Amino acid sequence: MSYAVAFSPEALAQLDALEDYISDASSPVIAARFIDSLIRYCEGLCLVPLRGTRRDDLLKDLRITHYRRTTVIAFMVDSDTETVSILGLFYGGQDFTALLPGDGE
């Protein structure tokens, strides 16, 4: 059975900001392709939700995976509701540990 994938408001805002950044750095077409592909990758978590690395040291039940070695995807899996919640998408050298909510407890 597949899980539902939900993007937090923060993750959606990060997608918009990332698209703007890539669009300015290269082109709107390249930015749109990258964002579409990143979203598809995130949606693919519905089939294998427990991929990535657990990072309970940052936030209880947090998991981290990477997309194309340039983007960190922070998410949580709720087995009871069969939902993957995308908490954040961090590009390049962003310090995602400082940008996540919580204190690891």
Image: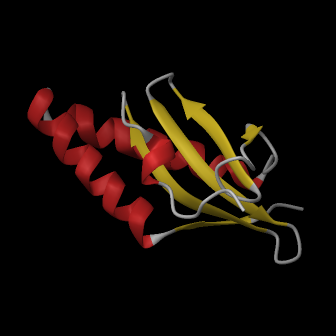
Q: Which residue corresponds to the image point at 72% horizontal and 62% vertical from the top-left? A: 105
Q: Which residue corresponds to the image point at 82% horizontal and 70% vertical from the top-left? A: 82
Question: Which quarter of the rendered picture does the N terminus lie within?
Answer: bottom right
Residue 53 position by quadrant:
top right
Q: Is residue 74 left or right of residue 1?
A: left
Q: Is residue 50 left or right of residue 90?
A: right
Q: At which x and y percent is residue 18?
A: 28, 45
Residue 23 position by quadrant:
top left
From this view, report whether residue 42 is shown above or below residue 78. Answer: above
Camera sees residue 28: no
Q: Is residue 32 left or right of residue 8?
A: left
From this view, report whether residue 43 is shown above or below residue 33. Answer: below
From this view, report whether residue 82 is shown above or below residue 23. Answer: below
Camera sees residue 50: yes
Q: Which residue corresponds to the image point at 43% horizontal and 26% vertical from the top-left? A: 70
Residue at the outermost left position: 24
Q: Is residue 97 left or right of residue 75?
A: left
Q: At which x and y percent is residue 99?
A: 42, 52
Q: At which x and y percent is residue 73?
A: 55, 44
Q: At which x and y percent is residue 66?
A: 58, 32
